[in-house]
Image (spheres, coloured by chain):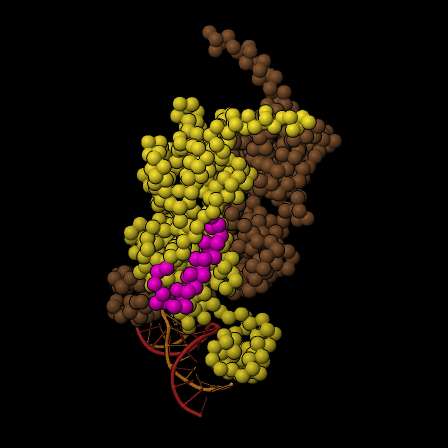
Chain colours: A yellow, B brown, C red, D orange
Amino acid sequence: MAGIADVARLAGVSKSTASRALTGSGYVSERTRDRVAEAAATLGYVPSTSAVSLATGRTQTVGVVMPYVNRWFFAEVLEGIQHALLERGLDLALYDAKPGTAGRRRIFEHFLARKRFDGLIAVGLEPEDEELERMLALERPVVSVVAATSATSVVSIDDGHAARRATEHLIDLGHRDIVFLGGGSTAHWAHVDRRRMSGYIETMTDAALADHVRHVPSDVTCPGGYAAAVDLLGDARRRPSAIVGVCDEVAIGAIIAARRLGIRVPSELSVVGIDDHEYAEMFSLTTLRQVPREQGTAAVALLERHLSDPTLPPTEVRLKPTLVMRTSTAHPDSLESAMAVDMRATPRSGA
Amino acid sequence: MAGIADVARLAGVSKSTASRALTGSGYVSERTRDRVAEAAATLGYVPSTSAVSLATGRTQTVGVVMPYVNRWFFAEVLEGIQHALLERGLDLALYDAKPGTAGRRRIFEHFLARKRFDGLIAVGLEPEDEELERMLALERPVVSVVAATSATSVVSIDDGHAARRATEHLIDLGHRDIVFLGGGSTAHWAHVDRRRMSGYIETMTDAALADHVRHVPSDVTCPGGYAAAVDLLGDARRRPSAIVGVCDEVAIGAIIAARRLGIRVPSELSVVGIDDHEYAEMFSLTTLRQVPREQGTAAVALLERHLSDPTLPPTEVRLKPTLVMRTSTAHPDSLESAMAVDMRATPRSGA
DNA sequence: TTGAAAGCGCTACCAG
DNA sequence: CTGGTAGCGCTTTCAA
């Protein structure tokens, strides 16, 4: 365990000079800098992080708080954050704060107070007032990824826009009987889900389809979407011609349900999602793409700015999702028209 | 930022006494202990972790290295670890070491060397020799979750056993033409996948079905299994009567492919997986259940033992997966027999 | 049972 | 440009 004193001795300089040479702060002649670097290299010197932290007050660590790590969006954001931190030589302290658990309480009451990080990234946290206060009381910059508050900097997509585009796409195709699937299955409506539903409702209303607005609640998971869709589609009288999923996982659940019930997608049912989940391609799901990984790296970049300039006011970075057309959506009457086209086209293949 | 000096002053004792009272080490009278505790509480005292680390040499942090966080198994293990750590008041430093990336190199070359943790948990890491050496050179206990080495303590399931049970189940049902799907799609065969395939081959051989041994490679993901299965099942001459998926994700991919191709599961094709993935239920997948979350908590428990007793030799904890029967498997001729049963049963429903 | 003092390993200030 | 020195906030001997 070589310390900086050993490095200094080997290089024939004082500890202070060695420190300056190594950290690159203050004036050091090039020759000594090289000698120190060489000494450090031959000794395999690695500074003690706790000593550095104690002396500088900085931990070189970023804390990440999220309610889940086993969901696509969160895992992707986490990877993005990790990637960006690695590049900057920063450590990542993870806090998995599942809503309503003792662990979450402990995190907010004890772990955060230890301040083992220079800044915090809160991903889709939906904090209670008290939790938010605790985070702000830390006097460390915090950046949220997906949030309803503007007390912190925020990185997110425009959820309302995403849902509007999805709904418009369906309406343009000729659908009127469009259901919004997912969210609101428990007392707690996540803000994202709510914003997306609002986008759907606005668009329906603008298209004079307010009468057709229909929300079918479900857990915001693939099995959740599946279960709700089995229910919805199983009854022919309730069956819509199209579904806007609150997210891809739910939309995919709906597609699986449709297939099980022998309902053809897209000829008998159009489905559109929001996310561009890794499974979207496999299900040919038309969706509004967001790239959570980029949101993670954007959050790190933003946090870095806060770190270097503590006066920087809360900032918003809002990304626009883009429509990715696959084949889970079509005209409501496409079965017939597809057949008609086929028949007209027959001569060609028969020729 | 109240420090221990403030607490000591308020309690009317010395710093050393305050420290002993707070950490619970050494003799302190009950009265003073209470006074100190009260003073700490009123001041909202939180010890500086870097100062504590510097003085004690312990970081109260566990490092977790894994190649992915966005796959079911890894995310679940991570949650298990986090949960167990939270209970013990330990922080979690995450290192996402995706194979072949610059980030992974940086982690092994720089981040680990900083030793910002008292111990390390390596999840499904499949480290190169040099990487393993670096971890061991840290002189910190390391516990692996899923590993081929016995240089470290290991927590895992018995993969060979899982694959044997899966294959036996199919053979008992009357299948002979059983394909092992997944793994080996790239130059790198993960050890887990290899062990599972070995279990399959052994079982086939023991049942005098060595001639029927067939491996169809695929990426070990749901889309990977899907793509390979579309290929395999699309050609009627190559189509097996049953599939053992290297894991549930692959098995589910196969089921999705079968459905798309209009092949009925289980009457025309039986599929069994290994994992009991969160989507297994939705696809009625028969599988061998493992609970990665438990492996995470077991790893923490084991690491804790190493921490308190540095002489503890590497230990293995091997969990046995259990067969969960759902409805993705049946007799190979079940279509006919099911119909026969139906016809015989008709009077009952018709009565 | 308590207190004084000496570090833990590093940075940063202040002379030189 | 360099060296000495005083902390950063806590734990831990060692005496009392």
Q: Which residue is drawn at 49% across and 82% down?
A: A27
Say above or below: A259 vs B154.
above
Residue A153 position, x and y percent, is 37, 58
The boundaries of the magenta stretch are A290-315
Residue projecting furthest to the right: B211
- Taking the magenta stretch, the answer to whether it contains residue B298 is no
Residue in the foreground of this view, choosing between A5 and A36: A36
Q: Residue at x 58, y 63 (%)?
A: B109
The reply to whether residue B55 is in sight is no
Residue B275 position, x and y percent, is 54, 38
Say above or below: B134 vs A210.
below
- Quick check: B269 left or right of B24? right
The reply to whether residue B201 is in sight is yes
Residue in the foreground of this view, choosing between A149 and A341: A341
Residue A161 position, x and y percent, is 40, 46
Q: How many numbered callouts? A: 0
Q: Which residue is drawn at 32% across and 39% down?
A: A187
Q: Quadrant of the N terminus of chain B?
A: bottom left
- Taking the magenta stretch, the answer to whether it contains residue A301 is yes
Residue B178 position, x and y percent, is 66, 30
- Quick check: D8 left or right of B333? left
- Quick check: A102 left or right of A331? left
Q: Which residue is drawn at 34% across and 39% down?
A: A206
- The secondary structure that most of the magenta stretch takes on is helix
